Image: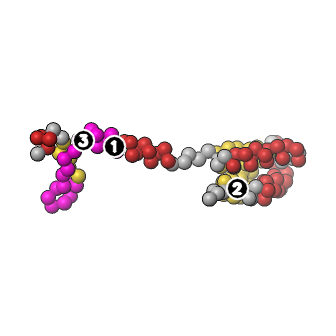
Amino acid sequence: MAREMELDLVEISAKTAPPICKILNYSKFLYEQKKKEKLLKSKTSKVVLKEIRFGPQTDDHDYEFKKRHAIKFLKEGAKLKTFVFFKGRSIIFKDQGKILLLRLAEELQDIGKVEQMPKLEGKRMIMLIAPIKKK
């Protein structure tokens, strides 16, 4: 029957007692499958990670400037990785770094939620903030 119609006989399920087959144009079937996969792939969202770096004694003006950038990044839908970098002996100010990051988290709580609380990794204290999805 498939030869008469100049189409392909495609086996759908081989595990059933009589195998299930379908008569169709196989190249068109593959094209449709690729098209569906491409559509599903385009609908998945890509996570963008933006970084903002502070020092342990960041001034108020610099802090506000970087906070505005953080707000912009979160509104665009990007995740935010904020960190305080300690150089040399400034590691003794790790409590100031933690206070700075927690202050930022508190001020951004209406547009972003903290995924990872401030944690010291080597000479960096890192905190992750994800945007809140609006409905």
Q: Nearer the viewer, residue 66 or 31?
A: 31
Give the class, few, some or many, for how many residues have Cα within 10 Å of label 1's Cα (few <14, many ≥20): few
Q: Give the Cα separation between the discs numbered 2 and 1.
A: 40 Å
Q: Earlier in the sequence, mark 2 or mark 1?
A: 1
Mark 3 or mark 2, which is nearer the start of the sequence?
Answer: 3
Q: Which residues are magenta?
A: 13-33
Q: Does the magenta segment cover residue 32?
A: yes
Residue under numbered circle 2:
112
Q: CA distance from mark 1 to mark 3?
A: 10 Å
Instruction: Report the front residue among 88 and 40.
Output: 40
Three-letter amino acid code at disc 1?
Glu
For disc 1, the marked residue is 32
> Which mark is drawn over residue 26?
3
How crowded pointer 3 is (Cα within 10 Å; few <14, some 14-19, many 20+) is rated as some
Compare residues 130 and 4 and report the one nearer the observer: 4
Q: Secondary structure at mark 1?
A: helix
